[in-house]
Image: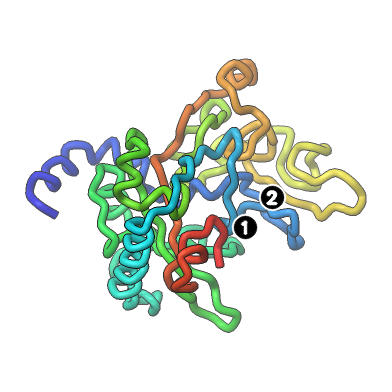
Amino acid sequence: MNSRFRTTLAAVALIVIASVSFAVAHDMDGMDMDSASDSGGVGAMGQMGAHMKMSDHMTMTESRPMTPADTQRGEQIVATMRAKLAKYEDYKVAIADGYVPYMESVPQDVYHFSNRELTAAEYMGDFDLAHPGSLLYEKKTFGGYKLVGAMYDAPAGDTPEQLDALIPLSLSHWHAHTNICLPKGVTEADVINGNVAARMRPDISSAVDAPQGFGRSSGSGDSVRMRVGYLADPRFGFTGTISNKADCEAADGTFHKQIFGWMIHIYPFASEDLKVAFSLEAP
């Protein structure tokens, strides 16, 4: 990090701190605590980072035609990540280097180990393939973690051209979380830090107490899915039914056109095949 960047980082530390207390919270959409497997993929805690698709709450960059130069860049990106991040195949080395597992006790398909300082640097435009803001792991059956990839971030204001210069838009899609309605009293910092109990609905304390549509699945054949805290109300959050400012204000909520910056997942340890390495689905 050069001296100019260090000075800038210090100057905006109070602003950045809220947005880097782990950008991985963007994958919380739904924050379902599944008591049974969810083959439909709606349980974000069971499918964290496993699959992404366009929606009112998920904005993605448009695809661009593949060029030979993009293919070459993709191969270089995969090779660089493999060489520079191989040491993190031992997840304990990652922890020693400041990568902290996010919500480790909650079952997930992909676990994010995030570094606060590096994520802050990315949100300020300091992009480095060798130093991603987050590392992506799968939990091994008999303990430990398997490194599968990394997540990179970019400033929310970056243009498609700027994002393409980082990771070609022909290879994959950068994504941003948009049109988010949060209940009154819940801040972006609460979301980022996984503080879903920041505003607990007084009439809903568990999946057992919740009426249909609030905190539990309906239908006799559905598994019970606990949605804790403000997410017990399906109108709010990253997969909430509210996706516009007028409806959000009518529900006494606060509307956020975008939360976090741009993000992208890359899985170089899954395959040398670019379609796999840059897939929107976890390997």
The circle drawn on residue 47 is: 1
Q: Horizontal placement of 278 versus 51: left or right?
A: left
* Snapshot quadrant of residue 209: top right
What is the secondary structure assignment of the residue under circle 1?
loop
Front residue of 22 and 241:
241
- The local crowd at label 2, few if under 14, some if 14 to 19, many if 20 or more residues have their Cα within 10 Å, is some
State the quadrant of the N terminus.
Answer: bottom left
| Residue at position x 53%, y 50% in the image | 27
Residue 21: percent from the left, percent from the top? Answer: 38, 48
Q: Amino acid at mark 1?
A: Gln
Please determine whether, in this image, residue 181 is positioned above or below residue 148: above
Q: Horizontal placement of 107 versus 66: left or right?
A: right
Residue 241: percent from the left, percent from the top? Answer: 68, 31
Front residue of 250 and 151:
151
Going from the N terminus, do you reach mark 2 or mark 1 first?
2
* Snapshot quadrant of residue 248: top right
Q: CA distance from mark 2 to mark 1?
A: 8 Å
Q: Amino acid at mark 2?
A: Val
Seen as rendered, the residue at the extreme right is 220
Residue 151: percent from the left, percent from the top? Answer: 41, 57
Please say whether residue 112 is visible from this viewpoint: yes
Q: Horizontal placement of 86 versus 280: left or right?
A: left
| Residue at position x 62%, y 48% in the image | 31
Q: Horizontal placement of 117 versus 29: left or right?
A: left
What is the secondary structure assignment of the residue under circle 2?
loop
Please determine whether, in this image, residue 119 is positioned above or below residue 248: below
**Which colouring convention does the figure follow?**
rainbow
| Residue at position x 57%, y 23% in the image | 253
The circle drawn on residue 158 is: none
Label count reads: 2
Residue 185: percent from the left, percent from the top? Answer: 52, 28
- Per the image, the residue denoted by label 2 is 42
